[in-house]
Image: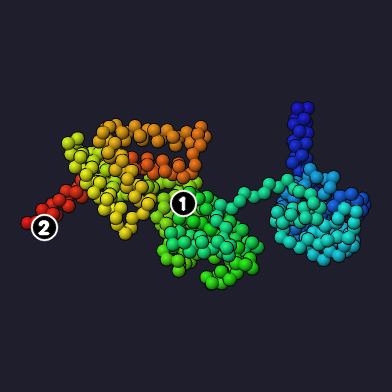
Amino acid sequence: MQLLRLLLAVAILASACLASNVLDLTKTKDFDSTVGKGQGVLVEFFAPWCGHCKNLAPVYEQVADAFSSKKQSVLVAKVDADKNKDLGKRFGVKGFPTLKWFPSGSLEPQEFNAGRDLNAIAGFITEKSGVKSSIKPPPPPAAVQLTDKNFDLVVKDPENDVLVEFYAPWCGHCKNLNPIYQEVAKDFENEDHCIVAQMDADNAAHKHIAQDYGVSSYPTIMFFPKGSKEKKPEPYNQGRSRAEFLKYLNEKCTTFRTEGGKLTELAGRMPSLDGLAARFYAAKSEARPKVLEELKQFVDRLSKAETASAEKNKAAEYYVKVVEKTLAKPDYVSNETKRLTKILEKHASGASQLSGRKADEIQKKLNILKAIVDKKIAKNAEKASQAEEEKKVHEEL
């Protein structure tokens, strides 16, 4: 008896799982009693042996689910036109699958000839009936969307490194790449000058731009390096996984991003200053003022170099700040490391919220603090300093 109840429960569960919101109108009497009445009806005429029909089946189920709460206005149905050939012939069905829209109160169908993806079919029903589906709109793309209006402003800005995907909305390879490409764009969203962008090159207004760069197939991906306004793009011929895009962009843009947009331990650091600051931290109290002065002089020279930038100067100033505070308070690095770590932990747990750029700024400071107390860095820097001193003495002799 208990086994019987179990089997019955399984059968009920299976029945529930197999329930479909797609109405089967294969029987002529079912079709005639449903279509042309009070609701608009989308009908798929299919054949069980048809490969394209089999591919469409799960998408069509999703379409029906998306309008399942609106059955008083819209129905999604199907007809096995191989089993009921007369019904297929009645509406001029010559191939499978054929989708036809029957407006409310009408037996004069309108053929559906657009894409066979969920959004395209659901959009068609909404257009014809005015009834909205339950499909949530996709999130806005993370990649910068280029047009004929902003292309030069973004891509030709001499301060920007820009990766551009030239795509076409109908391109299957582009559709497959898009989720990965958007994830990569999210990984770099806090980088002001390493930009992941894309352009609909099939758009009539954009075709002349694509032609200028020799785009003849989709997707075509190009990297526009920073420099002069007359940029010469480099074709991107690497792999198309998220990891391969990250590796490529980190090398080209001199960035340190990981999947998820986090920073590696190298972000924000300047190796030459790592050594000086670590030497200061490892030095005895009486030797520290001399190393601090050496650090200040080096930072001053860096700020006047041709390669100087606001970002580099800001990082260099932080090294000086930390060393100066440590001179006054020996426990400063340890206490500051604990404080900043706690802030990031609260952010990660959701107890507090930081902007992405603020979290990056704190992580870069932590990276510098950890480098300053790194004994290996200090030891290597001391060896390099001694070698330099010996070289000077040798040259004087």
Q: Quadrant of the C terminus?
A: bottom left
Q: Quadrant of the N terminus?
A: top right
Q: Which residue is drawn at 77% across and 55% down?
A: 127
Amino acid tagged 1 = Glu
Q: Which of 283 and 170 is in front in this view?
A: 283
Say which quarter of the image contains residue 218: bottom right
Is residue 61 visible in the rendered image? The answer is: no
Q: Which residue is drawn at 88% across and 60% down?
A: 108
Amino acid tagged 2 = Glu
Q: Mark 1 points at which residue?
A: 191
Circle 2 SS class: helix
In the rendered view, tell whether residue 27 sits above or below residue 199.
above
**Image location of residue 157, percent across then percent down:** 47, 61
Within-10-Å neighbours for mark 1: few <14, some 14–19, many 20+: some
Mark linked to residue 395: 2
Within-10-Å neighbours for mark 2: few <14, some 14–19, many 20+: few
Q: Which of 153 and 249 is in front in this view?
A: 153
**Image location of residue 140, percent across then percent down:** 61, 51
| Drawn side of residue 359 relative to residue 39, left or right | left
